[in-house]
Image (spheres, grey):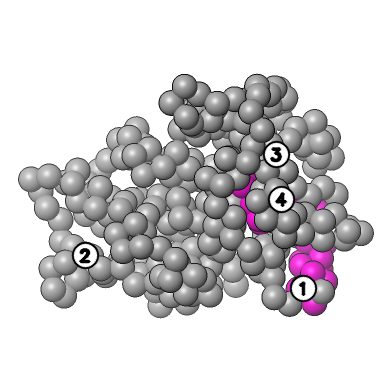
Amino acid sequence: MDPLVRAVEEAVGGDAPRSELAFAKINLALHVLGRRTDGYHQIETLVVFADYADVVSAAPSEDGRMHLSVRGPFAGNLTEGTPPGQNLAIRAAAELLRVAGKRPPQPARLTLTKRIPIAAGLGGGSADAAATMRLLDREWGLGLTEPELNRIGVHLGADVVMCLASRPLVARGIGEQLTPVTGIPPLPIVIAHPGVAVATRDVFAALPAGDRTPLPSLPTKFASLLEVIFWLRQARNDLAEPAVAVNKAAGSAVRALKRDPDCLFARMSGSGAAAFGIFVTLEAAERAADRLRQARPGWFVTAAMTRGA
């Protein structure tokens, strides 16, 4: 059975039409070009999404109020570390309620099955918000267009706009200016997270000042997996060193993946501490994931495929 189908069935008992997947975001490369006058940073990042996801499901609310319950392997981290009202899924639902205006929909009881590690550089919270917006737009029959959803999403966070798309893209500005990318094949990867949380705000604060070069030009189509690797070796993740400066353990997943004999390329994703390693086949990635789980039993480790375009 497809692992995502299994995840949905475990989360909502097979009621797939009333559920939405929140795909893990992978920053294949992330260049921070400089600091803007408003204090935000100008970035360019090549983003893909893995077929590993949280699941958001909806059911009618018995008391006429919005509710969110969280379960899954990382539920405790989220409920313990997120102040009331700050969960991005609930904020996304509140924004859609506001947009509904004079046509108030039936409030829903939302369930978030949390499978993506928290504060890992995998965009889990943003993906949850995006999935909630897509789900409730469908459940409530709002019929919002992609630009309308994006305008709502950007107020929740630039990464939410990327996650609404959930397809290969280059994001610029603070991450809200999206250019869809084609010609990227699905990539067999291992995602590894050593279990340490690194706050994005702290990582950006540790980033040395200065202007940096943009992403290398992307080909119209990558001819092979090796061509993808060659391009990635010319690109960077400018947040990797600052993440390690904030927490030395943030670099441990990249080092572990690079030591695997079958790993072609490894890099930190986003502000870390999760990392991805690229392999020739999904079977090779699964074998490497098994080896890493045995060596690091306390880590989150999974093999996955990225969604190509």
Residue assigned mark 2: 66
Q: Earlier in the sequence, mark 2 or mark 4?
A: 2
Q: Earlier in the sequence, mark 4 or mark 1?
A: 4
Q: Residue 244: which disc?
A: 4
Q: Which of label 4 and label 1 is nearer to you?
A: 4
Residue shown at 67%/62% (left/top)?
A: 193
Query: Residue 201 colored magenta?
Result: no
Q: Earlier in the sequence, mark 3 or mark 1?
A: 3
Q: Amino acid at mark 2?
A: Met
Q: Is residue 118 visible?
A: yes
**Helix, strand, or loop for circle 2?**
loop
Q: Which of label 4 and label 3 is nearer to you?
A: 4
* Coordinates of residue 190 in the picture (x, y in percent): 73, 59
Q: Residues within 10 Å of mark 2 (few under 14, many from 20)?
A: some
Alpha carbon separation for disc pair 4 and 3:
12 Å
Q: Quadrant of the N terminus?
A: bottom right
Q: Earlier in the sequence, mark 2 or mark 3?
A: 2
Residue assigned mark 1: 296
Q: Is residue 118 above or below residue 212?
A: below
Q: Is residue 266 above or below residue 112?
A: above
Q: Which residues are magenta?
A: 270-294
* Coordinates of residue 197 in the picture (x, y in percent): 59, 60
Please state which of residues 17 and 278 is positioned toward the viewer in this rendering.
278
**Helix, strand, or loop for circle 3?**
loop
